[in-house]
Amino acid sequence: MNIQKYMKPVFGSIFVLVGLVACTDLEIEETDSIISKATSGGFTPVANPASSLSDLYNKVGTDFQTQETMYAMSEVTTDELLIPTRGTDWGDNGIWRQLHTHTWTPAHLFIKNAWNNLNQNVFRASEIIESSPSAEVLAEAKFLRAFNMFFLMDFFGSVPFREVDEGPEINPRVLTRSEVFSFVESDLMEALPGLPDGSPGTANTANATKAAANFLLAKMYLNAHIYNGGAVDNANMQKVIDLVDDIKDLGFDIETSGYFKIFESADDSETILYLKSDIGARIWNSMHYNMNSPDNTGGGWNGFSTLAEFYDSFEGAPNSNYVGDGQEERRGWVPDATNADNINLGLGYGFLINQQYNEDGTKLKNRQGGDLILTKEIPSLVGNGEAVGMRILKYHPYDVTNEGGEVNSFRRHQILFRYSDAHLMKAEAMMRIGGDPTAMVNELRQTRANTPDLASVNEDELLAERGRELYIEFWRRNDLVRFDKFTAPWSLKEVTGDPNLNLFPIPETALLSNPNLVQNPGY
């Protein structure tokens, strides 16, 4: 395994090995529950709420930048990503394979850390809220509390909640999933009047705005039947439609200047909320060791790959993705010897398959000196060669809009909310109340080069379109659960059909530290 991988800000697999040992120790630690700074005498407000808010933004950005926890649970558990073991590399005692095959347990390190991070963020936001902040700080803290509680609700269902004046001797009360839904909804509605509007291409897209709050509300109402049980409610679908219209009225729209330009650091019309997250893990965890990386001298980490069946959901030649193959824009392209240029470092965009090239048009080699040919198929979860599996590159190391076009692969700009997602949410809401989403889906596709109109759009096609537009952007698991496809089979994962797997288990350590918690069914 490439030792340089562990020297980046993102935790490498070596730390996973350490954590796997640690997570078998069931001794309760402060990070295993929500530990209050309060004593039995009451709550001491934070000294500087604005500074604490800034720290919380940074903490959330850090939580979402790693390849583990939030990202692994949102994407590696789906039909978009697979981390095959190549030799001994990325074996890590099976922790990645468990996510792909849905065989995780309550002791899984990534699940435990996600639980702890999200709960800590909720409590820190509550401390800011209860410290008499300014109106704007109060609104942003309520948004951040709602943001973190949303993901707890989505991943785990029930959520513990500790009041700021409760000391560590108090076991936090536990909110049911429907109670969390109401709590998050209330926080967002209370936050809205105090938030700035938000508009595309402005600095405040890295902070809470009305546009961001409306996006999160739309995401909640679209999934309300999952969180609250029962059938789809037409009133909730109408709320989704109205909220997306509100976002559009603020100036957000589908980006038309090029799909992959959205993921550069320049302004665009789509970005509603980005996190100040180091995006290095979105680049190097997929790239082969020998792929060009002038600001990352250790090369790629040779881990994350995509599945052949997901690649096949895009238009284009089934076994090639070179420039000029006629593929749709969002599937990207691989430069070859005939179109090499120095601007792109020899790296393409999107799905990288077959022979890979340097910027001078010469063939890249693997570590044994043979041609570096990335394979479409992944034959097994283990025992693979180092070139097995297509790679995905959405955030490119060469940001042509940044610093005069210099390499800057570790910029802090990770998009989490964007307008095309909202646009597809509106199309889905229309579909679920009996409308035809085809025109809206095609409106998006018409802005993506070489992407023909669809004759009609049903549920399966809409889910596929969300995958094509939003791959590796944290939303695939959420989508699969809503479309009742999360427990379906895909390559190297057997069908489970167990609806209990739509929720992750409550970590063992959390259950020990708070007897009010009850394990989710099936674990």
Image: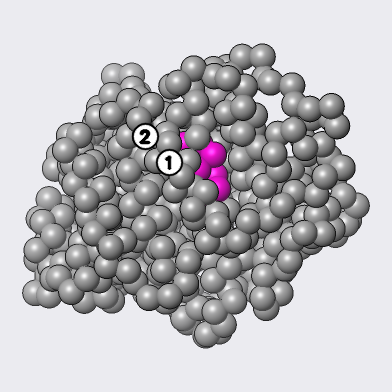
Q: Which quarter of the picture shows residue 105?
A: bottom right
| x, y percent for residue 358 | 36, 43
Q: Is residue 311 left or right of residue 227?
A: left
| x, y percent for residue 204 | 35, 25
Residue 119 sits above or below residue 177 on the image: above
How crowded is the residue under tag 2: few (<14 C-alpha within 10 Å), some, or many (20+)?
many
Q: Which quarter of the picture shows residue 298?
A: top right
Residue 238 in sight from this viewpoint: yes
Magenta highlight range: 143-151
Residue at image mark 2: 192
Judged from this view, the residue extending furthest toward the front is: 41
How crowded is the residue under tag 1: few (<14 C-alpha within 10 Å), some, or many (20+)?
many
Q: Are marks 2 and 1 in contact (CB under 8 Å)?
A: yes
As rendered, which of 107 and 262 lies closer to the eye?
A: 107
Q: Is residue 372 left or right of residue 313?
A: right
Tell me the amino acid under the disc marked 2: Leu
As rendered, which of 360 and 15 lies closer to the eye?
A: 15
Residue for point 68% across, 52% down: 160
Tell me the amino acid under the disc marked 1: Leu
| x, y percent for residue 220 | 40, 55
As rendered, which of 305 and 369 lies closer to the eye?
A: 305
Residue for point 43% across, 22% down: 136
Q: CA distance from mark 2 to mark 1?
A: 6 Å
| x, y percent for residue 498 | 57, 82
Judged by its main secondary structure, the magenta piece is helix
Residue at image mark 1: 188
